[in-house]
Amino acid sequence: MKLLRSIPTIPPTSLLFLAIGSTQLGSAIAKRLFEVMNPAGVALLRVGFAAIVLLLLWKPQKQDWQSHWRSLVLFGLALSLMNLTFYLAVERIPLGIGVTIEFIGPLGVAIANSRKLLDGLWVVLAAIGIGLLTPIGGLVLDPIGIALAFLAGGFWAAYILLSARVGRALPGGAGLALAMAVGTVVLLPIGIWSGGSDLLNPIVLLVGFGVALLSSAIPYSFELEALRFLPVQLFGVLLSLEPVAAALIGFIVLGETLSLRAMIAILLVSIAAAGASRFATRA
């Protein structure tokens, strides 16, 4: 964070775009790693290395854990299951589609906290977008992958709500660092069981560390810095570009091509998320 603050020439919108790109690049590299390791093992590496980096960065105090351990346990559980189910989903379906479906989680949180009639439009757009990703009309996608992406979206919604609660109670990123540590403990059994001896492979560990930096440590730091200057509603609008960025990086890094129908679905969900964020109440 000190490094970021020493470079005031970087506009906050650019920091957020870098965070979005970093997150999706990390996801694409993680999917490449599925070729040699089960997604559960990759999820363990991502959360585990991110926990180490964030604990060293924020240095949470003992009283932080003692005073808020219930919220931190729930936060860590949501975080770990969000990552696990998302990785299991994109193992079966394209990255862009997985992120689009998962984005229903934060979109639902934004709409649930508003009482405006206009929000009905965003619900309709999102519903049409998700509907276009169903098998109706000939589009073929793995139904288990779709279900897992929806489940990841539910955990993302829980992550957002718990993040807000922990963020009010603990300073800076101390809460996230502790939650990452909890998430690591949660993922240890299944990660070790599925990863096996590959978890001792230096190259796999190095790539896993890179995934943790790209998917967690770097984007979180950039987003936190951007939020110091950007209105929350604008932040939400820009963040709605995540599905589009995922589709683009999925094509560039993974060679995943999408049909016109899938691209329209991604665009509709992104518009719905942007609209819900732009017109959300400040509360």
Image (cartoon, rainbow, N blue to C red):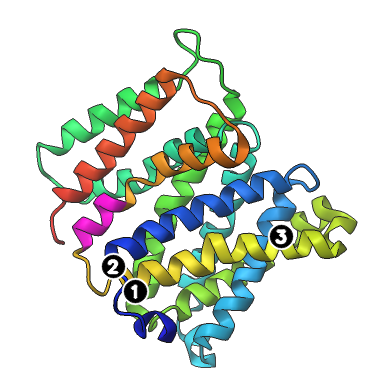
Pointer 2 and pointer 1: residues touching (CB < 8 Å)? yes
Judge the density around disc 1: few (<14), some (14-19), many (≥20) Cα neighbours within 10 Å. Answer: some
The magenta segment is 232-238
Residue type, label 3: Val
Tell me where residue 154 appears, x and y as whole percent. 45, 45
Q: Callout 2: helix, strand or loop?
A: helix
Judge the density around disc 3: few (<14), some (14-19), many (≥20) Cα neighbours within 10 Å. Answer: some
- Residue depicted at 51% across the width and 58% down the height: 78
Looking at the rendered structure, the number of numbered marks drawn on it comes to: 3
Residue type, label 2: Pro
User: Residue 207 got which mark?
Assistant: 3
Q: Callout 3: helix, strand or loop?
A: helix
> Among all residues in the image, which is located at the extreme front?
9
From this view, report whether residue 71 is shown above or below residue 272: below
State which quadrant residue 231 falls in: bottom left
Tell me where residue 92 appears, x and y as whole percent. 64, 32
From this view, report whether residue 152 is shown above or below residue 80: above
User: Residue 12 got which mark?
Assistant: 2
Tell me where residue 26 appears, x and y as whole percent. 57, 54
Q: Callout 1: helix, strand or loop?
A: helix
In this rendering, would 199 be left or right of 246? right
